Image: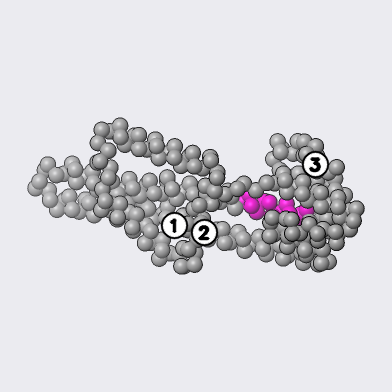
Amino acid sequence: MDLTSLIGFLATWILVLASMASGGNFGAYIDVPSIMITLGGAIGATVISNPGDRLKNVGGTFKSVFFSKAPDLIGMVQMIVSFAEKARREGLLSLEADVAEVDSDFMRKAIQLVVDGTDPELVRAILDTEIGVFEDRHSQNKSMFDTLAEFGPSFGMIGTLIGLIAMLGNLQDVSALGPGMAVALITTYYGSVLANWVCAPASSKLAKLNDTEIKLKEVMIEGILSIQAGENPRVIEEKLKAFLAPKDRKGLGEEGGGQ
């Protein structure tokens, strides 16, 4: 579980609830018809905007915001360097025995292509296509939360207009104006909460996870093609260090890479 996302999610909600409770009348912020207009409208519009096969993934996509495992770039660099050392000693075909032990399907495919003697340019083309399809799929999943973030405030405003129309239709009752205005504004509040507490942060996190995963795959491509070209393991390690943050580069060789 990604504790930072969970802590941020809960901290935001706790602070919002505490602010609401400090007003002395927590019940004033709860209005079922407003929730139905805002949440129901936003979800309905999102369903219309996306094909059914994509909607099936929304639960798993949202779950990944909290339960995703950050790619281990350092570990991948170390693995590739160890493969380079083995290939240098025993030849490329020796890597076939390690395919089953690799967790990443992408990495397994890359190794198998190289072991099979595939032309380097074709290897890169195949793997680049894999990355493109992967990125497109993640972009589509992320777009559902972008759509919800867009429609949430919009339907909140629609609810506000509905409330104002109802209130203005009953102007003769002056005592009802204040409560009526409050109810009208609640839908805007719900729309803002849906967009800024749930959807926009989830979309941002998914984008960052996708960027990191793409970087990991680029490391795999550069590493495997370098092994195929017969480059020195030390050179490969230095080349792959460019993908790492400066603080992660220090001591990489001491942890097992480039020996």
For mark 3, give the secondary structure. Answer: loop
Residue drawn where x is 50% and y is 61% of the image: 57
The residues tagged by marks 3 and 2 sit, at their Cα atoms, a distance apart of: 37 Å
Colour basis: one colour
Which of the two labelled residues, at mark 3 and mark 2, occupies the earlier sequence position?
2
Looking at the picture, which amino acid does disc 1 mark? Thr
Q: Are marks 3 and 2 in contact (CB under 8 Å)?
A: no
Looking at the picture, which amino acid does disc 3 mark? Gly
Marking on residue 147: 1
Mark 2 is surrounded, within 10 Å at the Cα level, by few (under 14), some (14 to 19) or many (20 or more) other residues, namely: many
Relative image position of residue 39 (x, y in whole percent) = 34, 54
Residue nearest the viewer, comparing 133 with 169: 133
For mark 1, give the secondary structure. Answer: helix
Relative image position of residue 202 (x, y in whole percent) = 49, 49
Quadrant position of residue 181: top left
Q: Left or right of 200: which side holds 132?
A: right
Quadrant position of residue 19: top left
Which of the two labelled residues, at mark 1 and mark 2, occupies the earlier sequence position?
2
Residue drawn where x is 76% and y is 59% of the image: 99
Compared with 120, 30 (above or below) is: above
The answer, for residue 157, to whether it is visible in the render is: no
Which stretch is magenta? 211-223
